[in-house]
Image: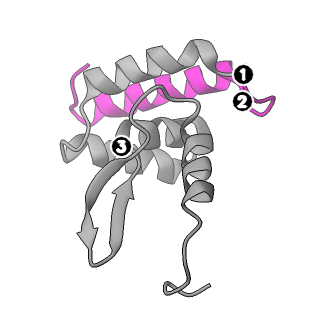
Amino acid sequence: MSLRQPVDRARIEQFLAALGEHFQRPRRVFVGRFGQLDVFHFDLYSLALSKVARGRRQDYEDVLLLLKSDRIDWPELDQAYRDVLPRMGQESLRQDPAEFENNFRALASMWREAGGQR
């Protein structure tokens, strides 16, 4: 598919909605318009929580970088986590609420060790 082909906007919207279902937060943030292309990125808190849920070393490093660079802040990330935790495991058998909770605690520990405040 080239960039010159028409984009099926409904399929893109459906894809974005599916990815953001677990987080009752804005699903995307408008970056800007470049010619005829509208550019969005996912809400950084939703992105951070998805990385916590996956729990790989690089994911933790990515979230810590977002925190250290003030792209996200700890109190809001913590609140987003608290909002999402009760719904984990309800929408997919692959989700493990206990693992998500353990991963978030590990991130909190790393954040404190890095000098971040809770």
The reply to whether residue 115 is visible in this rendering is: yes
> Is residue 111 a member of the stretch shown in magenta?
yes
Quarter of the image with the C terminus is top left
What segment is highlighted magenta in the picture?
A: 90-118
Name the foreground residue: 59 vs 31: 31
Return the residue at label 1.
89
Q: What element carries label 1?
A: loop
Q: Name the residue under label 2.
A: 95
Mark 1 or mark 2, which has the lower sequence index? 1
- Asked whether 86 or 117 is in front, the reply is 86
The kind of secondary structure element at disc 3 is helix
Residue type highlighted by circle 1: Gly
Q: Quadrant of residue 97?
A: top right
Find disc 3 in the rendering and name its residue.
44
Distance between the alpha carbons at the discs numbered 2 and 3: 20 Å
Residue 71 covered by magenta stretch:
no
Q: Is residue 113 left or right of residue 96?
A: left
Is residue 28 toward the left or the right of residue 13 in the image?
A: left
Q: Closer to the N terminus: mark 2 or mark 3?
A: 3
So how many labels did they put on this image?
Answer: 3
Q: Which mark is residue 104?
A: none
Q: Can residue 55 be spotted in the picture?
A: no
Q: In which quarter of the image is residue 67?
A: top left
At label 1, counting other C-alpha atoms closer than 10 Å, the crowd grade (few under 14, some 14-19, many 20 or more) is some
Mark 1 and mark 3: span between their CA atoms?
22 Å
